[in-house]
């Protein structure tokens, strides 16, 4: 293949690892240009010229007239074809690899990606969406498990199909999906993880330890998804109380979300508000929560209506929506 000097534009995410793992497995000479997803660098004009989709990864092959390839699946095929490795050349063998590669590109990747969005990053926890994507991931994992029952790897020898699927599936915990009982999948996950080239590729652009950097990672992902504007202000035990406070905030023109988090300390109902009005909302909620219940005890509803009236009289805290 002659001199190959590949430039890899990437970030520490499953789609990025597919490219770096393949480059490591193939022993190709490459340089890494990290892309700061949380700063939206992937949407900058110069980068869109390389990758019209504004996502990572992208490669530029300076050993082939500066040829640019975007879409991780296309990058894997390109590298395999350039080197004649990690994918058989015969029609059927090649097709088998492409089938499992497409399975990852059209199934595993999008479903785990959505599971992450709704389970990890969304300010509002929508049980239906979380459940739907996690179930679909589990179903896809079972498909892999069945294939791996009588195949050491997904399609013949170790190939780009294994690299693509492994890069996503090994992050199953982050998506909140169990691999319990999927013994063949577990065996395959461990075997691929043990490969030195996989370990080197997985550490590109830098090692991201989800255990310690989890919060930072979530913040980064939220910024990337433009969800950064909502921050939690209070957890309360009852849904009714959460709804009352939600209503109060809304009546003052403060955008708020309710979410459900079983692990929340004083939860499980979490009230999140737009960051720009966080201090104001916090003060208000602290005041509300400190107030003793009014007497005489009417059914809730009248409970803080006076406060609403009082607050709405202050012109500066009212905004028209
Ligand atoms: N189908 C694309 C998906 C790439 C993709 O979604 N990349 C994510 C990181 S895993 C990304 O760049 N996200 C940035 C954004 O959404 O702006 C591929 O396989 O290359």
Image: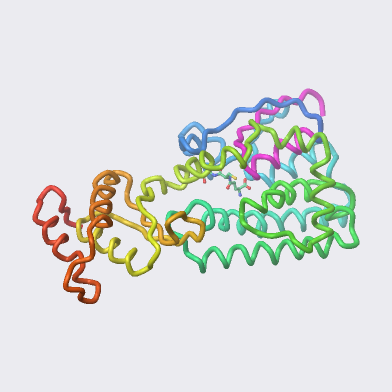
Q: Quadrant of the N terminus?
A: top right
Q: Residue at x 14, y 55 (%)?
A: 311
Can residue 39 be found in the magenta stretch? Answer: no
Instruction: Say whether residue 192 is left or right of residue 307.
Output: right
Asked if one can make out residue 234 in the rendered structure from this viewpoint, the answer is yes
User: Quick check: 3 above or below 314?
Assistant: above
In the image, the segment drawn in magenta is 1-24
In this orientation, which residue lies closer to the viewer: 4 or 262? Answer: 262
Can residue 18 be found in the magenta stretch? Answer: yes
Q: Quadrant of the C terminus?
A: bottom left
Residue 150 percent location from the top left of the image: 90, 62
Q: How is the image coloured?
A: rainbow
Q: Residue at x 86, y 47 (%)?
A: 158
Residue 252 percent location from the top left of the image: 20, 56
Instruction: Say whether residue 205 is left or right of residue 88.
Output: left
**Number of on-image labels:** 0
Q: Residue at x 28, y 61 (%)?
A: 245
Residue 68 percent location from the top left of the image: 63, 35
Tell me the quarter of the picture where residue 139 sits.
bottom right
Instruction: Say whether residue 243 is left or right of residue 78.
Output: left
Asked if one can make out residue 48 in the rendered structure from this viewpoint, the answer is no
In this orientation, which residue lies closer to the viewer: 117 or 248? Answer: 248
Q: Residue at x 34, y 63 (%)?
A: 242
Residue 253 percent location from the top left of the image: 21, 56
Instruction: Say whether residue 261 is left or right of residue 149.
Output: left
Q: Residue extending furthest bottom?
A: 299
């Amino acid at each position: 293949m002659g001199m190959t000097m590949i430039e890899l534009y990437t970030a520490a995410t499953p789609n990025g690892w597919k490219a770096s793992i393949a480059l490591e497995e193939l022993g190709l000479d490459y340089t890494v240009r990290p892309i700061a997803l949380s700063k939206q660098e992937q949407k900058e004009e110069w980068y869109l010229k390389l990758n019209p989709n504004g996502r990572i990864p992208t490669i530029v092959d300076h050993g082939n007239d500066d040829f640019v390839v975007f879409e991780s699946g296309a990058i894997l095929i390109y590298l395999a074809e350039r080197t004649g490795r990690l994918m058989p050349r015969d029609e059927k063998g090649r097709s088998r690899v492409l089938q499992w590669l497409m399975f990852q590109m059209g199934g595993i990747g999008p479903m785990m990606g959505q599971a992450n969005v709704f389970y990890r990053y969304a300010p509002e926890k929508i049980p239906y969406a979380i459940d739907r994507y996690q179930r679909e991931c589990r179903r896809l994992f079972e498909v892999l498990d069945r294939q791996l029952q009588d195949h050491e790897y997904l399609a013949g020898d170790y190939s780009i199909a294994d690299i693509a699927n492994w890069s996503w599936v090994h992050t199953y915990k982050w998506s909140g999906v169990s691999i319990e009982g999927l013994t063949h999948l577990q065996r395959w996950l461990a075997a691929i993880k043990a490969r030195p080239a996989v370990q080197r590729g997985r550490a590109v652009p830098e090692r991201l330890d989800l255990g310690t950097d989890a919060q930072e990672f979530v913040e980064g992902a939220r910024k990337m998804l433009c969800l950064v504007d909502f921050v939690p202000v209070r957890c309360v035990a009852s849904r009714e109380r959460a709804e009352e406070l939600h209503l109060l905030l809304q009546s003052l023109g403060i955008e708020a979300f309710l979410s459900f988090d079983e692990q929340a300390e004083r939860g499980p109902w979490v009230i999140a508000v737009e960051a720009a009005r966080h201090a104001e909302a916090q003060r208000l909620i602290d005041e509300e929560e400190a107030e003793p219940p009014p007497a005489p005890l009417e059914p809730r509803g009248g409970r803080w209506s006076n406060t609403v009236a009082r607050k709405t009289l202050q012109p500066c805290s009212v905004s028209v929506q």
